[in-house]
Amino acid sequence: RKEVEQDPGPFNVPEGATVAFNCTYSNSASQSFFWYRQDCRKEPKLLMSVYSSGNEDGRFTAQLNRASQYISLLIRDSKLSDSATYLCVVNMRDSTLTFGKGTMLLVSP
Amino acid sequence: SAVISQKPSRDICQRGTSLTIQCQVDSQVTMMFWYRQQPGQSLTLIATANQGSEATYESGFVIDKFPISRPNLTFSTLTVSNMSPEDSSIYLCSVWVLGDRETGVTDTQYFGPGTRLTVL
């Protein structure tokens, strides 16, 4: 089983739609969780951390389910600029991060 | 936050040669990391480079192939030695920046813009 698994997509959605991504991780001792965004030919950039109680940042909501070992990201009112690859990232030990392969989102007019 | 620059941004190299990638950070950081992202793949950690100690390599990566220097708290280099086409990839430097519990800022990892390497 891969350490961090994501549906690669692509998810094709129209502007204004709500879209959700899930991610599962294998190590139950994982300590912290993040969603990164990576635009084509660019470096990954932190979108948001994922807290146990769930957290929201504008149109973005992240949830963590430790019992089932999955993380979700919900994007409401999708914008064209949301088109990117979303990387699920897990801190399994020390400060080293393990990255999922990413889920590609394409938002169309 | 941290601002990271890498040189070169891209290069095309011949098989058997070596390339050294530089990473410069605008602030002092303890932990620096080197990642590789091959086409269509996610990021894979090559090694962790802490100042004053030898780099720690992940499984599948060895010092002879990817020697790393970390002479101070703002700079590191990664060398890709004796390159083959399989080394064609994006190489990314990153740093771990501690957060602030009082303000609720979490520990965060920042990435450099990457070096796009093509080996012919």
Image (tube, coloured by chain):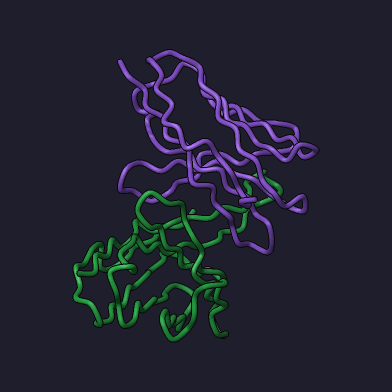
Chain colours: A purple, B green
Tell me, yes or no, if residue A59 can be seen here: no
Residue A79 image position (x, y, % from top left): 38, 21
Query: A78 or A106, which lies in front?
Result: A106
In the image, residue B99 sits, relative to residue A70, either above or below, namely below
In the image, residue A95 sits, relative to residue B71, either above or below, namely above
Task: Say whether residue A74 is left or right of residue A82.
Answer: right
In the image, residue A96 sits, relative to residue A18, either above or below, namely below
Quadrant where the C terminus of chain A lies? top left
**Residue located at (37% from left, 30% from top):** A83
Which residue in the rendered view is the most extreme toward the front?
A1
**Quarter-wise, where is residue B36 in the image?**
bottom left
**Residue located at (25% from left, 82% from top):** B16
Residue A72 image position (x, y, % from top left): 62, 32
Residue B37 image position (x, y, % from top left): 40, 57
**Residue located at (38% from left, 15% from top):** A14
Query: A43 or B27, which lies in front?
Result: A43
